[in-house]
Image (cartoon, helix red, strand yellow):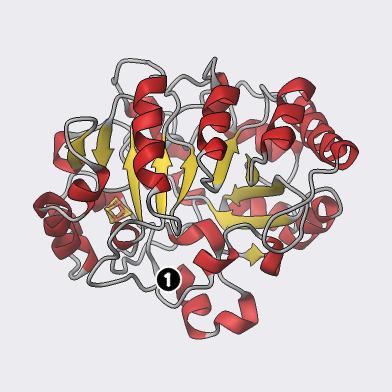
């Protein structure tokens, strides 16, 4: 990760990101993961260059509220665990997204939403403030409008910028204060990632400087096109990718669990296709805890978390998510600060 400015105690997940095993994994695994990553929908308005969603033939659908309640009920029994709404679609396209936020917050769960920002309205943002949403992260790409539009095919940069500024204004107007560090809620953050050429054209430092007055945290990461490298439209750009292609032991399998909108539970969020080989179990027939501590998850930890057996998994063999790019944080966490979501 090139740049990570964290909000110290005001980051709603600071306790998790700064815990001793965040970057190195907890083995044996915790009784319940730090994060339940939940996919509200796999519908999306965009067709991004880098996105593995273009490989997926999964049926399109939305999270059922009964299943959401089942997941939140179990998660609420583990106060150290937070929920992140993300997955292979745009969470704000779920027609009941406000209700989902209300259900989670009503159970006292710390909650984060990742969004491309395009569908955010003033009314929805006001409801998020009112309900106590903890963190709203905007996903960008590149360091300026031209780079953003190259990667985020079909998007509207000006609308995104306007919506981020609107979110900050609404939060300020409604006084969304609170949280363990006393910071305003929801915590607002931006994560962008860049290709090598883009780094030569513009400066991550300037990008961070442009946005830090508006949001609470800005992170710049490196774009990795490996998962989509076989697609004809991506191949010409492969030489531009800037991800670190050395592999490391996977820490994700010790930190978080991934739940698709249809209840499929996976080892991590990298599999857009919902492959059976990457599937640990299914809700609601099993509990999340049983899946998390079960044999299939443990076999996966043996494969990629305790050894470098990535070639034996159809998803992990293209994954360079846990690479030496995080070593700087492992070696000197006080210098750079924990990398937040970068680790899982
Ligand atoms: S795809 Fe990557 S992050 Fe996911 S389990 Fe495999 S190695 Fe870990």
Residue at horizontal 82 percent and vertical 30 percent from the top: 162
Q: Residue furthest right?
A: 173
Q: Is mark 1 within 8 Å of ligand 1?
A: no
User: How many badges with numbers are in the image?
Assistant: 1
Q: Is residue 173 left or right of residue 191?
A: right
| Residue 82 shows in the view | yes
Across and down, in percent, residue 197 comes to 61, 51
Kindly state the secondary structure of the residue where label 1 is placed.
Answer: loop
- Quarter where residue 58 is shown: top left
Occupied quadrant, residue 112:
top right
Instruction: Give above or below for 322 relative to 36.
Output: below
Q: Which quarter of the figure is the C terminus placed in?
A: bottom left
Q: Where's residue 229, x and y in %?
A: 36, 40
Q: Is residue 253 above or below residue 132?
A: below
**10 Å neighbourhood of mark 1: few (<14), some, or many (≥20)?**
many
Q: Position of residue 102 (x, y in %)?
A: 58, 30
Give the residue drawn at x 78%, y 30%: 163
Side of 247 where 189 appears, left or right: right
Q: Residue at x 19, y 47 (%)?
A: 291
Quarter of the image where one finds residue 140 = top right
Foreground residue, 294 or 166? Answer: 294
**In this rendering, position of residue 172 left or right of residue 204:** right
The reply, left or right, for residue 18 in relation to residue 189 is left
Residue 297 in the image, given as x and y percentages of width and height = 17, 53
Residue toward you, 157 or 146: 157
Question: Which residue matches tag 1?
Answer: 23
> What residue is shown at x 61% (from left), y 65% (from top)?
2
Query: Which quarter of the figure is the N terminus placed in?
Result: bottom right
Q: Does residue 63 appear in the picture of this structure? A: no
Seen from the viewer's position, the closer of residues 150 and 210 is 210
């Amino acid at each position: 990760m090139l740049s990570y400015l964290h909000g110290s105690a005001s980051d709603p997940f600071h306790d998790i990101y700064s815990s001793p095993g965040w970057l190195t994994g907890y083995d044996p695994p915790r009784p319940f993961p730090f994060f339940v990553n939940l996919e509200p929908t796999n519908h999306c308005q965009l067709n991004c260059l880098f996105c593995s969603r273009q490989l997926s033939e999964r049926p399109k659908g939305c999270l059922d509220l009964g299943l959401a309640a089942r997941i939140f009920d179990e998660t609420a029994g583990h106060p150290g665990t937070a929920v992140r709404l993300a997955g292979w679609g745009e969470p704000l396209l779920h027609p009941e997204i406000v209700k989902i936020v209300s259900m989670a917050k009503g159970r006292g769960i710390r909650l984060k939403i990742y969004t491309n920002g395009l569908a955010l309205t003033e009314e929805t943002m006001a409801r998020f403030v009112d309900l106590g949403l903890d963190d709203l992260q905007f996903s960008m790409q590149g360091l300026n409008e031209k780079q953003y539009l190259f990667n985020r095919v079909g998007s509207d940069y000006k609308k995104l910028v306007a919506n981020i500024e609107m979110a900050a204004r609404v939060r300020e107007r409604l006084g969304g204060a609170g949280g363990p560090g006393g910071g305003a809620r929801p915590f607002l953050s931006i994560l962008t990632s860049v290709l090598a050429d883009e780094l030569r054209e513009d400066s991550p430092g300037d990008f961070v400087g442009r946005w830090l007055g508006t949001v609470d945290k800005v992170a710049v990461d490196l774009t990795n096109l490996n998962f989509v490298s076989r697609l004809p439209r991506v191949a010409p750009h492969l030489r531009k990718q800037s991800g670190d292609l050395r592999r490391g032991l996977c820490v994700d399998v010790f930190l978080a669990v991934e739940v698709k909108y249809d209840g499929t539970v996976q080892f991590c969020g990298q599999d857009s296709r919902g492959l059976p080989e990457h599937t640990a179990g299914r809700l609601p027939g099993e509990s999340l805890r049983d899946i998390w501590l079960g044999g299939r998850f443990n076999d996966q930890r043996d494969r990629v978390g305790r050894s470098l057996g990535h070639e034996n998994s159809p998803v992990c063999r293209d994954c360079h998510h846990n690479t030496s790019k995080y070593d700087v944080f492992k070696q000197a966490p006080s210098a750079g600060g924990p990398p937040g979501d970068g680790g899982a």
